[in-house]
Image (cartoon, grey):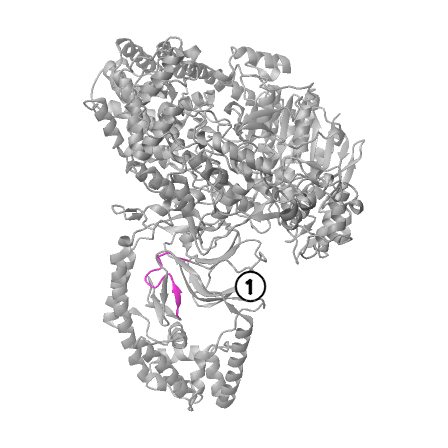
């Protein structure tokens, strides 16, 4: 486990598994707990969710609307919540080109992602229910519009268990930014706390408390040894003290995690070419930070972390990275610059390592943006249609699914709800969304509540 | 436990929107009365798809997919049959919707049954009669805890554990009662120890925290901008005081539900706080969005939903919020019941309660009033004396006038005032200029204009009376009122018309001035004549959305009409208007960038004045009246003579206390233009008076305020929202408590019904309130409730392990005046509480959950207990009580989300005083299962995960406190390693070490000394060494666990 970068995937997992001595990140007391799934053969083992909070403009990313060129600047007449007298249509601010064999159009915002279109299933017909960030985010993550429910990642680790008991099943790679809706977005809700997201930050201590406070490892070991001895005496005096036994075991596990987790996150041994590809050498701090998180995402998945979510740097103090009610030209461009290269690199890297087949990569935000503007080159929240894409892990490549009207205002073919999206993700992981249940509050709870249909059109 | 919240988006599944929004409401409104659950005229029911297809005596009423063949369509189209009978024909749009719905297959969503049908009703009534929790308390039982526990153990053939050793028991008692390790010498007897701890102020801090879990206590609103909840910490302090004072629980419940409405509110004379209204803060502690509740009605509905959820879980142990969209599937709670509670809560308003008793400021305010009266007299004298030169000063302003012999400053001031460019017609300068040009013409023009304006105002505006005050500053004043400037050379701010003001004594006094709910037939606009400063604001509140976007800050100190658009039309949503000082506006401090004058956020001052409100449809607000200028044209004379007369009249009348609004306008104009003496230096006496006034005003503390609910005007029965859809209105839901459990009779009230709700909750007819509370107290003392599902006493909740005991305790609880302390006392004096935590033989397998309490359950300390214990062990714990919370420590604060960082040790304050920021909570506490404050939580999860070990090993707080502990240990005096170990054991574990332990940790110290390169003989004095040993002790399971 000292040279993880040189160990091939399987060996590496085995090495980490051995080091664990049979104890994992999960609580000692819940180790006997059985995973709820899988229900059928899985197409994907792991998920990387690239969360794009704030609302990326769909008509300026993957869903071109030439009609808006004609209408640009003319008074807009939309019948939705933003409707007002002073609104104008706004043309797409970037050119689209066709890419790959499938010839899917991608705007100039995302040249790196564009090179992978043949791997992507682009869903243009997403629909959410809330034109508000907090609710939209919570809905995207939990399938509900209020806090208190488990996030997608928690459901998946609950359904499948962890591949590597030394590492958490659900990791959130984040910066200091807290998206609307709060930490609740990544909550395990009513599921056991072992399914909560472990936060890994881009700066400072990556994981809370993972860096030993004792600079001299021998000091910590000395303390732990005395502690263990004393605790054994304490536990021995108590019959049925399972909780105490578990707590004692947790200390040994915590001790090992102090080296295992930084080891997984240590990019020192990644080849220079890989580091460059992800943009780690970039002089742009945000771009380098996002590249770091994307590369960490790959390494975590490689080490067996089930679900990795990557948040997006929020550069403008807005209510979400992509929340450009004005200044869209400048800020979308900046956000794309910061994220595009690393995402492209992640797809390349996963493919080169043969991991893409089993890793589902998702690029999604809570909603899209309006085809009209109330404020210069700005667009407002648009839950009525928006675009996400998925790649790898059993998803058809080179597919564009669903269709919106000529304005990018409404879905006209194959609408996909957030519940459908969730059902599909679970399906690809071998989980039946109607059977992945947890009894709470007097009934069997589901991620998809009473809704959801697998989007057959994008499943390979 | 978390709520099952079926929110609108979830309820109104795609494809059923048409039915829920356009069809079901029409059927419910127009058809159910004759073809519904009550009556089935012609044998037909139309409240389910099956019933429609089955039809009545005339045959099937519905053929899905074929509107033209459906009798329902023919009937509403009046083709051969005319329905609704005797009523007006449905609107074409409604008919079209029904046709479209049938054409689309007549989707009638499953799982959204029609309003309670006969069978549901029967089932619910039956359940209400038989379910154990709803049955009356078995009264008069003398059953003791130990009898009940002993009996069940005997039945199960289980032995009882031995009594716990005294030190173990003392530690247990101390944590259970006060949340802290024991301190000081033990009392002579266990009973004395119990009584001592029961009277410790630490008890209130600990039990308040239990209660705060239940109230999903947070101090910020989360959502997107994490706004502050004004004065939330006052509610925390209120709880601490209440538990310490053993306020009867029924009183506490009354105060939570309707503390603002009690005839005799509870007053804390020592702290000069009106306690009762603070209880209503609980309503406001939940998450809340800032958005526009017209477009996004769910925002308002979700806030009330969370209130209903918290209220019913906390006080009744029932999950009522399931019934937002459909009748409860299992418990006897119908959708109407949900909306009955909604009607009650939405008939109240979010408000900010001022909790100071009058004594807090009485003497200062009396002094201010007295000095102000003297200032007024002095100013009147000065002003009267200034009238002498007035005719000459004015003549000097006339063309060709001469200023010789006059004070040049006053001449210049008059010039500035009268020569102003393009004055408005109501400005006396305009009249002056017009008269100088052509006196006769001016009079005619003014008369015509005055008549025109009066007519315009008469024809287009409807008065909007009935506004109500709140806050300490609000006073109604007659014309001629004025306010004293708190600083600077000017004495008064201006002379006001008759109206309502918050700052006639001090700008520090707060106030809110609220309109009634707008009448059903709405005009497009409401305009208020008002002024204000220092972040005072005006706004329309739609559907009680307390932190909506649309407030406006008063930018001007002078009166003008402010128009507000009424965006919610036709009584769909309740709307009222309010004027607020800064502390009463729950949006302030707003998110970054919204308030430009940041220094105002630090100012304790804020004020407004109000002089009338009108409703109108024309876009223009009322025109300024010209009545004050009429007097210029009543008598002949030069402009100077007319002005002098008009002004003299105003000053003289003001001096006599007889000023009217027109006089006030003249005086205000004069003062603002520097035409009347208004500087403290105008006379030595005035200077002295102003000094005295300002010194008193400086001493005034801003009133203490906390958010809560308040009532205003008549209550209203809001309609049931069909399937939870915010735009699909059903029948009005009468204000009452769950009808299957507490009767059908609506509350006899013209108000919101909160007071009646409070009484119903603690009334004799309700066995739940006492049972639920007794069970909560039991749970906190014994680790789990007699009913393990503390927040669910419904059909799906657990049955009580000892039902007779629960009832006996609940009955005694009521008999003993709902005393929580007596209840706690009875429990901790039981043998069951005093048993060892070592299970007797066989117990672990026969009763793994220890429901029968053969032994006391071993428990990990809560996050708060743990943090507090570390502070206690290190010696850093401060016993200071109350006050604003301390921000939790964060390594990455985010100011724009109001996620600030506080000191690492939280200033040594107990955890109950650490600020609960909803968007991202205190990390250390969360690791140890501090619950996310989203919903009522009567019992915490207890997890056992490695991240807890990591936190204890590496958290900077733990390390820093280990260091503090070591410093105090080493500074306590000389000693050897063994003395140090002994000292540490006493500090951390509260006991002596055994020989073996002394050797073990002495050995550790020696090893650490060598690792730290501390010479052996200096080890005992090395903070570095003892910090590590203390750190190890902090991690002992004996420290982390409660036996």
Which residue is nearer to you in this view: A230 or A246? A246
Which SS type dominates the magenta stretch? loop
Query: Is there any visible trace of residue B273 in the rendered image?
Result: yes
Q: Is residue A329 visible?
A: no
Residue A69 is inside the magenta segment? no
Magenta stretch holds residue B511 = yes
Q: Chain of mark 1?
A: B
Q: Which residues are magenta?
A: B498-512
Quarter of the view holding residue B874 = top left
Count all numbered tags in the image, as a single digit.
1
Tell me: residue B909, above or below residue B146.
Answer: below
Q: Quadrant of the C terminus of chain A?
A: top right
Q: What residue sits right under mark 1 in the picture?
A: B525
In the image, residue B861 sits, relative to residue B204, either above or below, namely above
Residue extending farthest left: B188
Q: Residue at x 35, y 82 (%)?
A: B648
Q: In the picture, which quadrant includes the N terminus of chain A?
A: top right
Percent coordinates x, y for residue A340 in the rendering: 66, 35
Q: Position of residue B319 (x, y in %)?
A: 50, 34
Crowdedness near tag 1: few (<14), some (14–19) or many (≥20) residues, C-alpha within 10 Å = many
Q: Nearer the viewer, residue B85 or B528?
A: B85
Q: Position of residue B899 (x, y in %)?
A: 46, 39
Left or right position of B603 against B425 = left
- Element at badge 1? strand
The residue under the point 51% across, 48% down is: B734
Q: Residue B236's x, y, as percent?
A: 36, 40
Q: Who is closer to the viewer here, B642 or B212?
A: B212
């Amino acid at each position: 486990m000292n040279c993880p970068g040189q160990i091939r995937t399987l060996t590496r997992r085995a090495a980490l598994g051995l080091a664990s001595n049979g104890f994992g990140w999960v609580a000692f007391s819940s180790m006997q707990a059985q995973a709820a799934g899988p229900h059928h053969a899985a197409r994907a083992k792991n998920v990387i969710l690239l969360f794009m909070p704030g609302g990326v403009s769909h008509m300026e990313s993957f869903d071109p609307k030439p009609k808006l060129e004609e209408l640009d600047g003319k008074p807009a007449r939309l019948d939705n919540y933003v409707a007002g007298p002073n609104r104008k249509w706004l043309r797409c601010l970037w050119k689209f080109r066709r890419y790959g064999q499938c010839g899917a159009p991608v705007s100039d915002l995302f040249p790196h992602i564009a090179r992978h279109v043949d791997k992507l299933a682009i869903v243009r017909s997403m629909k959410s229910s809330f034109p508000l960030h907090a609710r939209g985010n919570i809905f995207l993550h939990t399938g509900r519009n209020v806090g208190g429910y488990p996030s997608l990642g928690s459901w998946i680790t609950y359904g499948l268990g962890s591949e590597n008991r030394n590492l958490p099943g659900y990791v959130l790679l984040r910066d200091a930014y807290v998206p609307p809706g709060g930490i609740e977005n990544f909550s395990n809700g009513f599921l056991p706390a072992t399914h909560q997201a472990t936060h890994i930050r881009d700066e400072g201590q990556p994981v809370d408390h993972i860096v030993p406070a004792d600079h001299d490892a021998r000091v910590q070991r000395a303390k732990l040894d005395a502690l263990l001895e004393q605790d054994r005496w304490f536990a021995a005096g108590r019959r049925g003290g399972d909780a105490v036994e578990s707590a004692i075991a947790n200390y040994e596990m915590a001790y090992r995690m102090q080296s295992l987790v930084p080891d997984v996150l240590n990019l020192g041994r990644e080849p220079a070419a890989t580091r460059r590809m992800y943009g780690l050498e970039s002089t742009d701090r945000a771009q380098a930070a996002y590249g770091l998180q994307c590369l960490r995402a790959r390494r975590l998945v490689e080490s067996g972390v089930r679900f990795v979510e990557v948040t997006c740097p929020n550069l403008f103090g807005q209510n979400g990275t992509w929340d450009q009610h004005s200044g869209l030209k400048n800020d979308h461009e900046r956000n794309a610059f910061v994220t595009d290269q690393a995402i492209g690199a992640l797809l390349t890297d996963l493919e080169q390592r043969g991991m893409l087949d089993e890793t589902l990569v998702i690029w999604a935000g809570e909603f899209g943006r309006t085809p009209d503007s109330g404020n210069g080159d700005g667009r407002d929240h648009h839950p009525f249609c928006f675009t996400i894409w998925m790649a790898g892990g059993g998803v058809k490549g080179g597919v564009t699914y669903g269709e919106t009207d000529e304005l990018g205002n409404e879905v006209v073919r194959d609408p996909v709800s957030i519940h459908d999206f969730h059902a599909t993700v679970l399906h690809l992981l071998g989980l039946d969304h109607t059977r992945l249940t947890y009894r709470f509050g007097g009934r069997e709870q589901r991620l998809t509540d009473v809704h959801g249909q697998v989007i057959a059109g994008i499943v390979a | 436990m978390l709520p099952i919240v079926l929110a609108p988006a979830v309820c109104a599944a795609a494809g059923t929107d048409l039915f829920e929004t356009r069809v079901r409401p029409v059927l419910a409104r127009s058809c159910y009365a004759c073809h519904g659950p009550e009556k089935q005229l012609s044998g037909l029911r139309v409240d389910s798809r099956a019933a429609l297809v089955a039809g009545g005596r005339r045959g099937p009423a519905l053929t899905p997919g074929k509107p033209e063949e459906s009798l329902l369509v023919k009937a509403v189209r009046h083709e051969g049959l005319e329905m609704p009978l005797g009523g007006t024909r449905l609107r074409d749009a409604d008919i079209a919707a029904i046709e479209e719905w049938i054409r689309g297959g007549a989707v009638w969503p499953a799982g959204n049954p029609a309003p309670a049908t006969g069978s549901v009703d029967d089932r619910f009534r039956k359940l209400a009669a038989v379910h154990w929790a709803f049955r009356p308390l078995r009264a008069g039982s003398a059953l003791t805890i130990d009898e009940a526990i002993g009996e069940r153990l005997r039945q199960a053939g289980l032995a009882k554990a031995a009594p716990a050793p005294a030190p173990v028991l003392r530690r247990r008692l101390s944590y259970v009662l006060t949340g802290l390790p024991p301190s000081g010498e033990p009392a002579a007897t266990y009973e004395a120890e119990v009584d001592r701890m029961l009277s410790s102020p630490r008890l209130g801090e600990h039990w308040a925290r239990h209660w705060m879990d239940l109230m999903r206590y947070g101090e910020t609103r989360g959502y997107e901008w994490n706004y502050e909840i004004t004065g939330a910490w006052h509610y925390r302090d209120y709880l601490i005081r209440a538990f310490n004072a053993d306020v009867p629980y029924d009183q506490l419940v009354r105060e939570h539900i309707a503390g603002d409405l009690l005839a005799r509110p509870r007053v804390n004379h020592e702290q000069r706080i009106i306690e009762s209204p603070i209880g209503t803060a609980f309503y406001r502690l939940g998450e809340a969005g800032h958005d526009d509740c017209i477009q996004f009605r769910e925002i308002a509905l979700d806030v009330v939903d969370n209130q209903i959820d918290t209220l019913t879980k906390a006080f009744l142990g029932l999950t009522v919020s399931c019934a937002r969209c459909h009748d409860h599937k299992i418990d006897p709670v119908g959708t109407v019941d949900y909306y009955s509670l909604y009607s009650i809560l939405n008939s109240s308003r979010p408000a900010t309660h001022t909790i100071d008793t009058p004594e807090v400021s009485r003497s200062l305010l009396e002094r201010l009033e007295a000095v102000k009266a003297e200032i007024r007299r002095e100013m009147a004298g000065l002003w009267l004396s200034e009238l002498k030169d007035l005719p000459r000063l004015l003549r000097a302003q006339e063309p060709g006038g001469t200023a010789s012999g006059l004070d040049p400053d006053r001449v210049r001031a008059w010039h500035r005032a009268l020569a102003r460019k393009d004055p408005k017609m109501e400005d006396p300068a305009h009249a002056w200029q017009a008269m100088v040009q052509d006196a006769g013409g001016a009079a005619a023009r003014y008369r015509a204009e005055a008549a025109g304006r009066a007519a315009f105002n008469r024809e287009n505006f409807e008065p909007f009376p009935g506004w109500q005050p709140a806050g300490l500053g609000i006073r109604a004043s007659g014309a001629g009122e004025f306010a004293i400037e708190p600083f600077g050379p000017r004495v008064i701010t201006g002379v006001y018309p008759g109206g309502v003001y918050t700052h006639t004594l001090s700008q520090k006094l707060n106030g809110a001035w609220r309109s009634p709910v707008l009448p059903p037939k709405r005009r497009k606009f409401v305009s208020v004549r008002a002024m204000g400063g220092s972040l005072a604001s005006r706004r329309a509140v739609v559907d009680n959305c307390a932190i909506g976007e649309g407030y406006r800050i008063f930018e001007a100190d002078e009166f003008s009409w402010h128009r507000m658009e009424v965006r919610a039309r036709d009584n769909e949503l309740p709307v009222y208007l309010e004027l607020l000082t800064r502390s009463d506006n729950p949006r302030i401090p707003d998110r970054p960038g919204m308030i430009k004058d940041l220094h105002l956020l630090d100012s304790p001052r804020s004020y407004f004045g109000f002089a009338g409100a009108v409703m109108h449809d024309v876009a223009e607000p009322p025109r300024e009246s010209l009545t004050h200028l009429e007097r210029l044209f009543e008598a002949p004379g030069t402009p100077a003579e007319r002005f002098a007369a008009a002004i003299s009249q105003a000053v003289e009348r003001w001096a006599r206390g007889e000023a009217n609004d027109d006089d006030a306008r003249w005086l205000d104009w004069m003062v603002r233009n520097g035409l009347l003496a208004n500087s403290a230096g105008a006379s030595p006496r005035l200077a002295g008076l102003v000094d005295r006034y300002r010194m008193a005003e400086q001493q005034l503390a801003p009133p203490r305020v906390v958010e809560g609910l308040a009532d205003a005007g008549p209550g209203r029965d809001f309609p049931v929202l069909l399937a939870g859809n915010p735009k699909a209105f059903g029948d009005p839901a009468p204000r009452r408590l769950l009808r299957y459990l507490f009767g059908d009779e609506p509350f006899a009230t013209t108000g919101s019904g909160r007071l009646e709700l409070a009484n119903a909750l603690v009334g004799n007819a309700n066995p739940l309130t006492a049972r639920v509370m007794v069970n909560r107290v039991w749970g906190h003392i014994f680790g789990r409730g007699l009913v393990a599902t503390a927040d669910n006493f419904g059909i799906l909740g657990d049955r009580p392990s000892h039902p007779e005991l629960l009832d006996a305790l609940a009955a005694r609880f009521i008999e003993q005046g709902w005393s929580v302390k007596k209840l706690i006392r009875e429990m901790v004096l039981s043998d069951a509480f005093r048993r060892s935590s070592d299970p007797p033989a066989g117990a672990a397998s026969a009763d793994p959950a220890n429901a029968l309490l053969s032994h006391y359950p071993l428990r990990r300390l809560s996050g708060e207990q743990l943090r507090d214990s570390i502070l206690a062990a290190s010696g850093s714990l401060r016993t200071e009580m109350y006050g604003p919370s301390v921000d939790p420590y964060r390594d990455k604060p985010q100011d724009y989300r109001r996620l600030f960082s506080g000191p690492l040790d939280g200033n040594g304050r107990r955890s109950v005083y650490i600020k609960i920021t909803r968007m991202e909570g205190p990390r250390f506490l969360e690791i140890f299962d501090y619950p996310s404050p989203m919903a009522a939580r009567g019992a915490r999860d207890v997890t056992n995960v490695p991240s807890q070990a990591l936190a204890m090993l590496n958290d900077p707080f733990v390390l820093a406190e280990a260091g503090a502990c070591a410093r105090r240990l080493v500074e306590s005096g000389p000693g050897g390693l063994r003395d140090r170990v002994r000292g540490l054991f006493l500090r951390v574990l509260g006991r002596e070490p055994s020989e073996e332990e002394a050797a073990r940790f002495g050995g550790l110290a020696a090893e650490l000394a060598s690792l730290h390169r501390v010479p052996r003989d200096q080890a005992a004095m090395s903070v570095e060494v003892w910090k590590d040993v203390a750190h190890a002790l902090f991690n002992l399971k004996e420290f982390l666990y409660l036996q």
